[in-house]
Amino acid sequence: MTIRPNTATLPGTPQRVRRMTDAEINAAIDRQIERNILFYAEHPDEIPMRLRSLDAEWDIERALQANAAAVGLTGSLLALTRGGGWFVLPALVGGFLLQHATQGWCPPLPVMRRMGFRTAREIDVERNALKALRGDYATVAKDGDSAARARAALQAARSGPFAGTGSPVPAPGAVKATASPPTVPKPA
C-alpha cells in the first residue's frame, strides 16, 4: 500500500523544514552561507577542502533520523530491562517522525536548526556556489572582484535552471569531480 499525501495541503519535501523554521533562524543560516561564499571567493585554493567538508555534513533529515533512532532504541531497551512503561518513548518518537514527514516539523527541529543543522537544499546551495566560484559552471566569471563573483555564484546556485535540485547547468567539459573521503574538518 502506497500512501499518497494530499499535495494541496502538505508542503513539498524541499520547502517543509524551512517553512516550519523561524524566519530568524533561516536568515541566520542564509547569512552564514553568504559569509562562507565570500570567504572562499577570496580563498579559492581552499574550495576543494570545503567541498569535502560539505560532502561529510549531516543535513537536518539525517540528524533527526539518527536522533529518533537513538531515542527509540533507548526506549525499547529500557522497556525490556526496566518495564513496559518505557515503550511510550519509541511510540512518541514514531509520532514525531510521522509529524515531521508530513508537516516538516517535530519538537527537536527548532533546537537542531538553532544548532546549525541545514537542509540538504541549503547545503547544495553552498556546494554549487563554491563549484561556480571554482569555474565548474559557465554562468560565473572566474576573474574580477571576489565579492561580485561570490554574489554571482550564490545567484547561480539559488536560481539556476535546476535550483530545486541543487544542480546548475555546468559548462561543457568543465565539471570537476569533488567526491572525496569525508575526513576534512569543517572550517570555522
Image (spheres, rainbow, N blue to C red):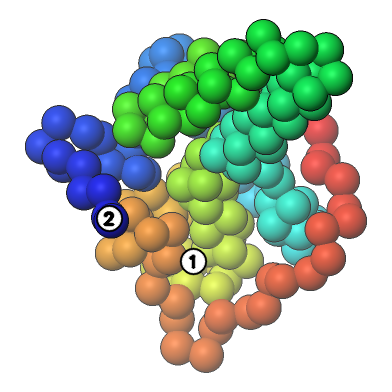
Residue matched to label 1: 141
Does residue 17 appear left or right of residue 180 in this picture? left
Residue 36 pos. (x, y %): 65, 39
Q: Amino acid at mark 1?
A: Ala
Mark 1 falls on what kind of element?
A: loop
Taking the image as drawn, is residue 36 in sight? no
Residue matched to label 2: 2
Taking the image as drawn, is residue 173 in sight? yes
Q: Say whether disc 2 or disc 1 marks the residue closer to the N-terminus.
A: 2
Foreground pick, 186 / 4: 4
Image position of 135 with respect to 12: above or below: below
Quadrant for residue 23, please give it.
Answer: top left
Image position of 33 with respect to 95: above or below: below
Count of labels shown? 2
Q: Name the front one of labels 2 and 1.
A: 2
In the rendered image, the quadrant that contains the N terminus is bottom left
Label 2 Cα neighbours within 10 Å, binned few <14 / some 14-19 / many ≥20: few
Residue 50 pos. (x, y %): 75, 53
Of all residues shown, which one is farthest toward the bottom? 173
Q: Residue at x 42, y 13 (%)?
A: 22
Quadrant for residue 44, please give it.
Answer: bottom right
Image position of 68 with respect to 132: above or below: above
Mark 2 falls on what kind of element?
A: loop
Residue 100 pos. (x, y %): 43, 29
Does residue 170 appear left or right of residue 178 in this picture? left
Does residue 139 appear left or right of residue 11 in this picture? right
Q: Amino acid at mark 2?
A: Thr
Quadrant for residue 24, please give it.
Answer: top left
Image position of 141 with respect to 50: above or below: below
Foreground pick, 96 / 175: 96
